Image (cartoon, rainbow, N blue to C red):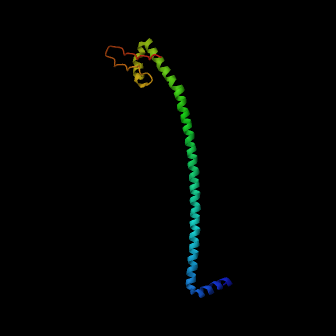
Amino acid sequence: MEPSDNMNHSQDAANGHSHGETSAIDSLRESVQTLRSLFQATLVALVILAGSLSIFLLREVSLVRQQVRELNQFASTYETTTVPMMRDFRYKLIEFARLNPDFAPILSKYFNPTNFSDSPKVMPAPEPREGQAPRLPELPEN
């Protein structure tokens, strides 16, 4: 034994502790120190986990914002270029059907005028009676 151990034992003996109680207290101190070390390691692991989760969520938020910008740009482009082209195509088809009555049944079958909200003057064509040609939709006046 080292001199410091002898000193601790003599102090324990002076305090009324026996050798068995001293070893139990030392074992308890060692257990508490081990428990503190495990608790600190757990806290460090939780801090690292929380930081990693925060970084992951930050990246996800930035990706979602980028996707929202791209989708807004796509919707804007669609509204400004594609929709007018489709309307123009529809008006040309209606005009073509007026000049070519054979095309009227095809037009009324696939291009129902009630599908377009920008032309409230256009009424849906009534169902053709037997022996009659289908009626063409009216073009709205611009």
**Residue at 44% of width from left, 15% of height from top?**
97
Q: Quadrant of the N terminus?
A: bottom right
Q: Nearer the viewer, residue 103 or 93?
A: 93
For the point 40% across and 24% down, which residue is it? 114
Quadrant hosting residue 12: bottom right
Q: Position of residue 138 (x, y in %)?
A: 41, 16
Toward the front, the furthest residue is 15
Residue 2 rendering spot, x and y as whole percentages: 68, 83
Tell which residue pokes out farthest to the right in this image.
3
Tally of numbered tags = 0
Where 108 sits versus 38, above or below?
above
Can residue 60 be seen? yes
Tell me: residue 104, above or below residue 72: above
Task: Work out which residue is located at the far left of the displayed protein and give it.
Answer: 130
Residue 57 higher or lower than 138, as above or below: below
Q: Quadrant of residue 136?
A: top left
Q: Position of residue 112 (x, y in %)?
A: 40, 22
Residue 112 appears in the figure: no
* Residue drawn where x is 59% and y is 57% of the image: 48
Image vertical order of residue 50 relative to residue 138, above or below: below
Left or right: residue 33 compared with residue 95: right
Q: Nearest the camera: 97 or 55?
A: 55
Where is residue 25 shown, x and y percent of the image? 56, 80
Residue, x 58% and y 75% (percent of image)? 30
